[in-house]
Image (tube, coloured by chain):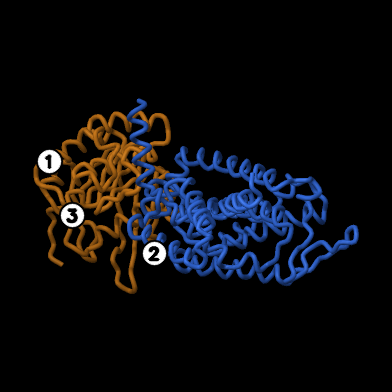
Chain colours: A orange, B blue
């Protein structure tokens, strides 16, 4: 169980997040949509420890993570992907995926995920030699290898065509597993409906609102 | 072996320690202009331990390495929130600070009618370990090369472990590293401390070989050369800095007959390298590529 309680964050007097609360059960799949600039990426950055909230707290299985550094979030099982894929371009893909899977059971899982994703042929390539759809899959695999508690995807559709996105969605559905909760921040609604079981909208100064209870701000 | 050749080779081996220490800092993404200070501290400590305290050379060199490592750890802790140009400036200041400390350090003793010990700008003379133990230049070369090989074995086993890849990740993209659960601060501190130990150990050997050391030897230019060797040779593997040392000192010595023109040749060569191989001769990508080809062939 992962939860955010009353998270607030402001940059130089501009309140980006005010009193955001969110609870995720294992295996839950949540989509977050919303207009540009309402703070979706800030929310991901706070939720994964890359930004520190000004108020509120973050808990994972009754352990408070709020003031921990980002690497401690990752070690506790809060994984994320980035809007533009992030890899080390001086090492081949295989080495980097192995770095994410340190425990023996993670290694097994990683090997299985690589096989299912069709990435075997790309393992010896450098990230800048691999097409974007493959890199998106690789990034998800890297996040999933250690069976995380929560996986945050920050706009996974960016740069993918409709067909590639569909394949990506199918791959996600099949490989997330029962334990991992998923949070997707997205603009592409069709994709969101495919991989999530509920969608909330983030609105300026109103936080997360159930999709459908549309109130103009 | 020719005395001249042996002493050039010994110098190359000793400077290789400095280049490797600069390399270890570069791997975690920082540029240090201060490795010469750890080299100097190591030299003074090893000299004091062997010539003043009469310790066995093994303990002397170990103390030099520990001294270098401690100074580097202090620098690492002081600069924990700095990176890039600010880190580089701090290392330069810290190194100069240590050099000024050596410049004012006076602790001389008279042993058998000889003045031994650090004597301010005059330096530390009469480090007679090499004479007392009847070491020829070639013997010392053998000792230095053995130490270098041991260091390389340690670095290569590090290179094969995930630690080095983690360090490179911290150096290239700290945000990515954190998302992978790696603690950048811990990596940086460990690698900076290790670099201090390597420089300190090399400095100790340098003191034993030179028999006289003075603060002026450990100026900024020494550190910049060490850094340049690592950058020219490439950051893909510990072999890179060695290649840098070999190219620079080896080439400069072998074309000595060209007198002042050799600097033109050397400068041109460095410029060409930076144009055609900006990541150094043995770049990380080259090493990663070779490794995967090697693995494919042997699986």
Label pair 3/1, CB-CB below 8 angstroms: no
Which quadrant holds residue A62? top left
Res. B123 visible in picture? yes
- List x then y, in percent, for residue B76: 56, 59
Mark 1 surroundings within 10 Å by alpha-carbon count, few (fewer than 14), some (14 through 19), many (20 or more): some
Disc 1 chain ID: A
Residue B209 against residue A24 in the figure, above or below: below
In the drawing, does residue B251 fall left or right of residue B299?
right
The CA distance from mark 3 to mark 1 is 18 Å
Structural crowding at the residue carrying mark 3, measured as other residues with C-alpha within 10 Å and reported as few (<14), some (14–19) or many (≥20): many
What's the distance in space between the residues labelled 2 and 1, CA to CA? 38 Å
Q: Are marks 2 and 3 in contact (CB under 8 Å)?
A: no
Lower sequence index among marks 3 and 1: 3
Q: Quadrant of the N terminus of chain B?
A: top right
Q: Nearer the viewer, mark 3 or mark 1?
A: 1
Q: Earlier in the sequence, mark 2 or mark 3?
A: 3
The answer to whether residue B198 is visible is no
Determine the chain carrying the residue at label 2. A
State the image coordinates of residue B223 (x, y, percent, origin top left).
Answer: 55, 62
> Are labels 3 and 1 assigned to the same chain?
yes
Residue B241 position, x and y percent, is 49, 51
Which residue in the protein does label 2 denote? A54
For this rendering, which residue is in front, B232 or A58?
B232
For label 3, the residue is A33
- Residue at mark 1: A166
């Amino acid at each position: 169980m992962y939860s955010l309680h009353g998270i607030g964050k402001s940059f130089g007097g501009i309140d980006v997040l005010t009193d955001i609360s969110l609870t995720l059960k294992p295996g839950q799949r949540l989509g977050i949509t919303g207009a540009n600039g309402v703070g979706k990426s800030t929310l991901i950055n706070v939720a994964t420890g890359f930004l520190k909230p000004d108020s509120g707290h973050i808990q994972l299985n009754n352990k408070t993570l709020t003031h921990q550094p980002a690497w401690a979030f990752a070690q506790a099982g809060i994984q994320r992907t980035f809007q533009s894929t992030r890899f080390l371009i001086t090492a081949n893909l295989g080495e980097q995926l192995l770095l994410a899977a340190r425990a023996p059971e993670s290694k097994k899982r990683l090997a299985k995920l690589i096989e299912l994703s069709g990435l075997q042929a790309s393992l010896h390539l450098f990230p800048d030699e691999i097409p974007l759809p493959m890199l998106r899959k690789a990034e998800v695999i890297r996040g999933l290898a250690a069976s995380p508690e929560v996986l945050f995807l920050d706009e996974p559709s960016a740069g993918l065509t409709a067909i590639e996105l569909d394949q990506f969605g199918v791959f996600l559905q099949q490989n997330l597993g029962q334990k991992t909760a998923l949070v997707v921040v997205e603009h592409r609604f069709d994709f969101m409906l495919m991989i999530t079981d509920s969608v909330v909208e983030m609105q300026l100064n109103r936080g997360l609102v159930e999709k459908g209870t549309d109130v103009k701000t | 072996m020719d005395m001249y050749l042996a002493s050039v080779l010994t110098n190359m081996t000793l400077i290789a320690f400095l280049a490797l220490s600069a390399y270890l800092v570069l791997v975690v993404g920082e540029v240090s202009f201060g490795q010469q200070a750890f080299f100097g501290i190591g030299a003074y400590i090893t000299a004091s331990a062997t010539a003043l305290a009469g310790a066995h050379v093994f303990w002397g060199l170990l103390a030099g390495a520990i001294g270098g490592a401690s100074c580097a750890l202090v620098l690492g802790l002081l600069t924990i929130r700095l990176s890039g140009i600010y880190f580089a400036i701090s290392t330069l200041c810290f190194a100069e600070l240590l050099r000024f400390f050596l410049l004012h350090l006076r602790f001389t003793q008279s042993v058998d009618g000889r003045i031994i010990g650090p004597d301010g700008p005059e330096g530390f003379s009469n480090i007679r370990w090499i004479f007392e133990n009847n070491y020829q230049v070639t013997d010392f070369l053998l000792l230095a090369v053995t130490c270098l090989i041991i260091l390389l074995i340690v670095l290569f086993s590090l290179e094969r472990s995930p630690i080095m890849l983690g360090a490179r990740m911290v150096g290239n993209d700290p945000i990515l590293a954190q998302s992978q659960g790696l603690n950048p601060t811990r990596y940086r501190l460990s690698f900076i401390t290790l670099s201090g130990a390597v420089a300190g150990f090399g400095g100790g050997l340098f003191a034993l070989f030179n028999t006289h050391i003075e603060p002026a030897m450990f100026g900024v230019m020494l550190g910049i050369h060490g850094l340049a060797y690592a950058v020219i040779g490439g950051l893909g593997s510990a072999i890179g800095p060695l290649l840098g040392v070999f190219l620079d000192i080896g080439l400069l010595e072998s074309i000595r007959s060209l007198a002042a023109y050799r600097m033109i040749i050397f400068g041109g060569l460095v410029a060409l390298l930076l144009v055609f191989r900006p990541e150094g001769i043995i770049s990380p990508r080259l090493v990663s590529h070779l490794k995967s080809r090697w693995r494919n062939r042997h699986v």
